[in-house]
């Protein structure tokens, strides 16, 4: 079973449906026991970083997410959920994040359109099981802030938007995708599939 962590801010329905389309059971939940027992967990998110962290703290799901990461089972942050994995964000901030990956989330700066919205090509930077059998292609982004990891080996893929932009991060069992894999066509769904394969929860849904 895959737990989709419900802290009141996220594209929960679309992520849940994407997981189910790939043949895995998904549950949208804020229950700590249910999350900790899951084979894999996804932290989605849309909105402002500070509001999201406040919601996580108010529900205790910040500590649950940290405990889950420490369990060694696969955890994936999507969009704002990826940014929450980092140490802090300057969005209406500063605000402290979950600090599972060292780094800072900053606003795009320059004379170009913000938010970054649309299809951009991924540049795979390192070998990771997420990329097994895949070729670099385009995925769908919508964001005004982007993550700057402190450690180069946490940066798995980038895209180009007036400079190098973090697209996929990972360390150990903790992964993040700045784009929306569930809205990114075949490549996005294949990346999500490769994450789900890491969970070992291979039983297809019975209808």
Image: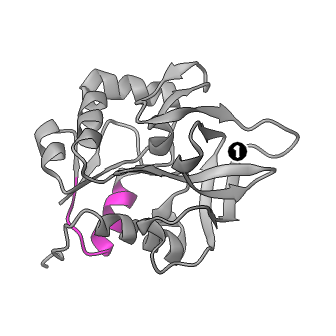
Query: What residue is shown at x 28% (from left), y 69% (from top)?
Result: 20
Count neighbours of disc 1 (C-alpha within 10 A) and say few if under 14, some if 14 to 19, many if 20 or more: few
Residue 207 located left or right of residue 118: left
Percent across and percent down for residue 192 are 40, 66
Is residue 124 found inside the magenta-colored segment of the image?
no
Q: Is residue 39 above or below residue 80?
A: below
> Where is mark 1, residue-wise?
115
Percent across and percent down for residue 133 are 47, 81
Q: Quadrant of the N terminus?
A: bottom left
Q: Is residue 139 above or below residue 38?
A: below
Which SS type dominates the magenta stretch?
helix
Residue 85 located left or right of residue 68: right
Query: What residue is shown at x 12% (from left), y 49% (from top)?
Result: 37
Q: Residue furthest top?
A: 94
Q: Residue 156's image quarter? A: bottom right
Q: Nearer the viewer, residue 67 or 79?
A: 67
Query: What residue is shown at x 43% (from left), y 30% (from top)?
Result: 99
Is residue 15 found inside the magenta-colored segment of the image?
yes
Give the tally of numbered discs: 1
Q: Residue 198's image quarter? A: bottom left
Q: Nearer the viewer, residue 43 or 46?
A: 43
Q: Quadrant of the C terminus?
A: bottom left
Q: Provide the residue span drawn in magenta.
A: 13-27
Q: Residue 54's image quarter? A: top left
Query: What residue is shown at x 19% (from left), y 57% (from top)?
Result: 39
Percent across and percent down for residue 19 are 31, 66
Residue 88 located left or right of residue 118: left
Percent across and percent down for residue 88 are 52, 26
């Amino acid at each position: 079973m895959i737990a989709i962590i419900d802290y009141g801010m996220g594209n929960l329905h679309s992520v849940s449906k994407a997981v189910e389309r790939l043949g895995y059971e998904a549950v949208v939940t804020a229950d700590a026991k249910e999350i900790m027992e899951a084979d894999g967990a996804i932290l989605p998110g849309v909105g402002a970083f500070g509001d999201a962290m406040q919601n996580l703290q108010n529900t205790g799901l910040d500590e649950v997410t940290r405990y889950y990461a420490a369990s060694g089972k696969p955890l994936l942050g999507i969009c704002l959920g990826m940014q929450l994995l980092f140490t802090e964000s300057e969005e209406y901030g500063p605000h402290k994040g979950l600090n599972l990956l060292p780094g800072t989330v900053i606003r795009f700066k320059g004379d170009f359109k913000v938010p970054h919205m649309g299809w951009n090509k991924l540049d795979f930077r390192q070998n990771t099981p997420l990329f097994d059998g895949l070729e670099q292609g385009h995925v769908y982004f919508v964001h005004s802030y982007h993550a700057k990891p402190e450690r180069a080996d946490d940066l798995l893929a980038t895209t180009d938007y007036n400079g190098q932009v973090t697209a996929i991060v990972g360390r150990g069992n903790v992964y993040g995708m700045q784009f929306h894999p569930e809205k990114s066509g075949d490549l996005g769904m294949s990346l999500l599939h490769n994450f789900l394969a890491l969970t070992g929860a291979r039983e297809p849904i019975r209808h």
